[in-house]
Every structure is written in structure tokens, then in C-alpha cells.
Amino acid sequence: MNVKLIAHTELSDDFRKSLPDECFDDYYENPSYSHRAAVALTAIRTCYSHLKPTEIVTAEGEKYFGQSATDGEDGTEADRLIRHIVASKHTSTLEHITYTFAVEGVSRSLLAQLTRHRVGFSYSVQSQRYVRFGSEDKSGGFEYVTPPSTEDKWKKGVCATSMYEQFMKTAQMYYDVLREMGVPAEDARMVLPNAAACNIVMTVNLRALLDFYAKRKRGNGAQHEIAELAERLREEVVKVDQWTTKFFE
């Protein structure tokens, strides 16, 4: 599995230019106070302020980004405000912050679980209809995911991992034969197993991602592969937005 953040919410050029120079320099050079935090602040304060959304960062930026948090925790008043909003369940304001990920080499079994999360998620998935997975095709055959539970499992001298891999080879053989017989890829794909790997581009807003993580993280009974995905997504977000760390705990 490979997970890479490929895009995220950024302030528009026009909006950035409307901010005072010192405002931009003070608040956004530190990655802890990123563009996403500014978007969150704008959305949150719009609900409670007489100011227009375009005026909030300019008028209140010094108060929220320039002062230490008054709740005794780390960060600034902006961090405190976001913590308060999350604690009070007013998390609709986090829906304005989105992240786009490349998710590579995950099983169709994981895909079936992942797409149960629909609100706040958008998916583009590698097609088994249009992408050919024959041994002689550009793909070189289908890749697959091996669950760790097959390791060190034996019965009557037969290793579970070996049996598993043999089945994958058999599935590939039948796929190849069906294609050679003139069966179109959209029908030959029926013999491909749940373990067959696929690639996904996924966009999700922060509120939906936090909900996904809470349900699928390790220790909550989630299957190993989707639990690993949850951790990888968290790592990618925290890497660019350190202020979100607490919300994944």
C-alpha cells in the first residue's frame, strides 16, 4: 500500500493578496498555522461574527494567530477555537478543508469497505473493465494483497501463504485463457479475486476524514488493511497540518 497526499485546500491568490503583508508572513510561514487553519478560522468565525468572511483573517488574525491559547493547551487562540468547535461537535465548519490522496495497491476488499464511507468522500477507481490485466498486457497481470494472517499457518505440511499464492496464479491463468478465447475484459474480470489490487484517487473533507479515522483506526476492530489505510491518511494530513494532530487522538 502506498498513500500520498497530492493536493489540499489552499487560499486563493486573490484572497492572499487581500491580506496585509505582515499578516501573511506572521501566520502562514509556520506550517502549524497553515492555509487550512485560516480557512477553518474563516468558516468558524463567519457563524458568530458581524464581519464578512473576507474580512475575518485581516480583522481578527492578530487575535487568533498572534496570541497563545487561553485554554492552557498548545498553540494559539486559533488552535483553541478549533479545539472548542470540535469538542462542541460543530464540525461542519471543517468540511471546507479538503485533502486529495493517491491510494495505490489496495485490495478490492478494502475498496468495498472504503466506499461505505460516502458523505464527504469522492472516489476515482482504477477500472477492471478498461484496464487489461492479462499477463501479456501492459499491466503484466493483476497484483494482489496478501493478508498477514496467512503467515506461519500450516496444515498437513501445507503453508497457507503458498496456497493463497497458488490460487492467485490460477486466477491469473483463467483470466488469461478467457481473454485468449475472446472474452472481453469486462467479463473476464469476474474471475479476479477480492485480493486483486487497485488504485484510487480520493478526496475527503476533514470532518469526514476524522469520522473515518475514529471508526477504522487500529484497535477498533477494523480489518488490518483498512486500519493501515486510516493510519497512513492520518500521517499524511498531520505532516502538512500539525494543528490537526490532536483531533486524530
Image (cartoon, rainbow, N blue to C red):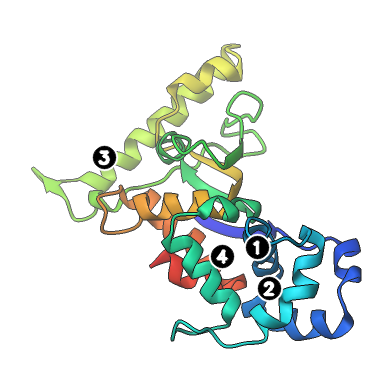
| 2 or 4: tag closer to the N-terminus | 2
| 3 or 4: tag closer to the N-terminus | 3
- For disc 2, the marked residue is 34
Q: Amino acid at mark 3?
A: Met
In the figure, residue 28 lies in which quadrant?
bottom right
- As measured in the structure, the alpha-carbon distance from the residue carrying label 3 to the one carrying label 2 is 49 Å
The label nearer to you, 1 versus 3, is 1
What kind of element bears circle 4? helix
Q: Amino acid at mark 1?
A: Arg
| 1 or 2: tag closer to the N-terminus | 2
- For disc 1, the marked residue is 45
The label nearer to you, 1 versus 2, is 1
Give the residue at x 58% y 43%.
199
| 3 or 2: tag closer to the N-terminus | 2
Q: Amino acid at mark 2?
A: Ser
- For disc 3, the marked residue is 163
Let me know if residue 229 appears in the view: no
Q: Which residue occupies the extreme left position in the image?
A: 156
- As measured in the structure, the alpha-carbon distance from the residue carrying label 1 to the one carrying label 2 is 17 Å
- As measured in the structure, the alpha-carbon distance from the residue carrying label 2 to the one carrying label 4 is 12 Å
What kind of element bears circle 2? loop
Callout 2: 10 Å neighbours few (<14), some, many (20+)?
A: some
Q: Which mark is residue 5?
A: none
- For disc 4, the marked residue is 237
Give the residue at x 22% y 45%.
160
In the figure, residue 191 lies in which quadrant?
top left
